[in-house]
Image (tube, rainbow, N blue to C red):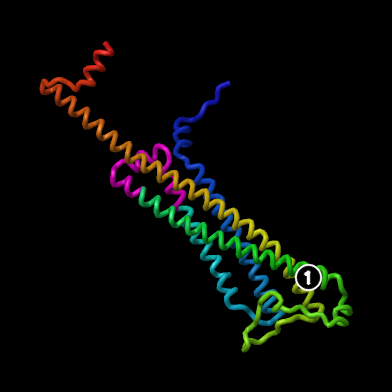
């Protein structure tokens, strides 16, 4: 049985940067899931818990919520640029695009620039992973409090014990001139808070996993960029070697035309062939 492929199939495969394509998918999907889940989780915390229950808000959390939209747009644009560069620096496309000395130098500068930006973004996403891990740990702590101290007790038991949930236990304080409260004591509000935590917590966990996927994608991009930089650098050396061979062949032909004897190594080659 013979497998028949259309014309140009293997040429198309040879021009496809599978490493950059895999990294592109990981970063795009991971960044989209990260921004979406964390935006929704912060919305539940800000509006569902702080504003509705504690009746105050934390300004920097709202700024962080907006920043996630900007992060998603920036990562999407940057990964598209990296994917395009990967296509240009792969297979026969690299030979066509980076053939001249100026083009090769431009390709090396572009690869070096993308490597630096990717390295900085990888460090930034490593910090994001650590911050998201803190949010996950806070969720696990509050969820354990809800299970052991709120869900397992009735409203009368909580009232008899004068139980109150205080935000200061987690380092969250409202401003001195800001209205609202730092603690919840009513059973209905306590359960409402725990329900919001149950809803937002898994979103923080998904965002944490997505941030790890984005970080791995950026590492793959770094590996591909380093490989492309080396290939473009080798292309310069190959171009110089090819130009030197062509110049030497022109000298040989000019010597033949003028009646001069060919170089000794050509005479040896002809005699050995004979």
Compared with 152, 261 (above or below) is above
Position of residue 64 in the picture relative to residue 90 (left or right):
right
Q: Which residue is mark 1?
A: 145
Quadrant of residue 240 within the rendered picture: top left
Quadrant of residue 45 within the rendered picture: bottom right
The quadrant the C terminus occupies is top left
At 47% from the left and 59% from the top, the residue drawn is 120
Describe the element under mark 1 as helix, strand or loop: helix
Give x and y (percent) for residue 127.
Answer: 56, 62
Badge 1 density bin: few <14, some 14–19, many ≥20, Cα 10 Å: some
- Work out which residue is located at the far left of the displayed protein and give it: 258
Give x and y (percent) for residue 259.
Answer: 11, 20
Give x and y (percent) for residue 159.
Answer: 86, 82
Whether residue 274 appears in magenta in the rendering, the answer is no
Task: Pick whichever, 200 or 269, lies toward us.
Answer: 269
Position of residue 74 in the picture relative to residue 94 (left or right):
right
Give x and y (percent) for residue 201.
Answer: 70, 65
At 73% from the left and 65% from the top, the residue drawn is 140
Quadrant of residue 92 within the rendered picture: top left
- Work out which residue is located at the far top of the displayed protein and give it: 274
At 56% from the left and 51% from the top, the residue drawn is 216
Compared with 66, 269 (above or below) is above
At 63% from the left and 79% from the top, the residue drawn is 57
Prevailing SS of the magenta stretch: helix
The quadrant the N terminus occupies is top right
Q: Which residues are magenta?
A: 81-107
Task: Pick whichever, 214 or 35, lies toward us.
Answer: 214
């Amino acid at each position: 049985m013979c497998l028949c492929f259309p014309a140009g199939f293997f040429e198309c495969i040879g021009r496809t940067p599978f490493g950059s394509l895999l990294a592109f998918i990981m970063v795009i999907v991971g960044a989209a899931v990260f921004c979406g889940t964390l935006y929704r989780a912060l919305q539940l915390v800000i509006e569902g818990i702080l504003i509705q229950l504690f009746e105050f808000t934390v300004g920097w959390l709202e700024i962080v919520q907006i920043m996630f939209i900007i992060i998603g747009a920036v990562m999407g644009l940057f990964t598209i640029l990296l994917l395009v560069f990967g296509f240009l620096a792969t297979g026969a496309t690299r030979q066509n695009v980076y053939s001249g000395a100026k083009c090769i130098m431009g390709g090396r500068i572009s690869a070096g620039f993308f490597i630096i930006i990717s390295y900085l973004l990888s460090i930034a996403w490593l910090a994001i992973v650590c911050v998201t891990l803190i949010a996950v740990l806070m969720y696990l702590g509050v969820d354990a409090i809800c299970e052991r101290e709120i869900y397992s007790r009735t409203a009368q038991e909580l009232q008899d014990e004068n139980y109150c949930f205080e935000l200061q236990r987690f380092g969250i304080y409202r401003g001195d001139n800001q209205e609202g409260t730092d603690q919840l004591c009513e059973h209905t509000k306590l359960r409402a808070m725990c329900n919001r935590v149950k809803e937002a917590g898994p979103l923080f966990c998904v965002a944490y996993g997505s941030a790890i996927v984005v970080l791995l994608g950026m590492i793959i991009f770094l590996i591909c960029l380093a490989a492309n930089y080396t290939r473009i650098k080798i292309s310069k050396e190959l171009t110089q070697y090819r130009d030197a061979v062509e110049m030497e062949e022109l000298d040989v032909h000019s010597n033949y035309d003028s009646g001069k004897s060919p170089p000794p190594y050509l005479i040896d080659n002809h005699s050995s062939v004979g």
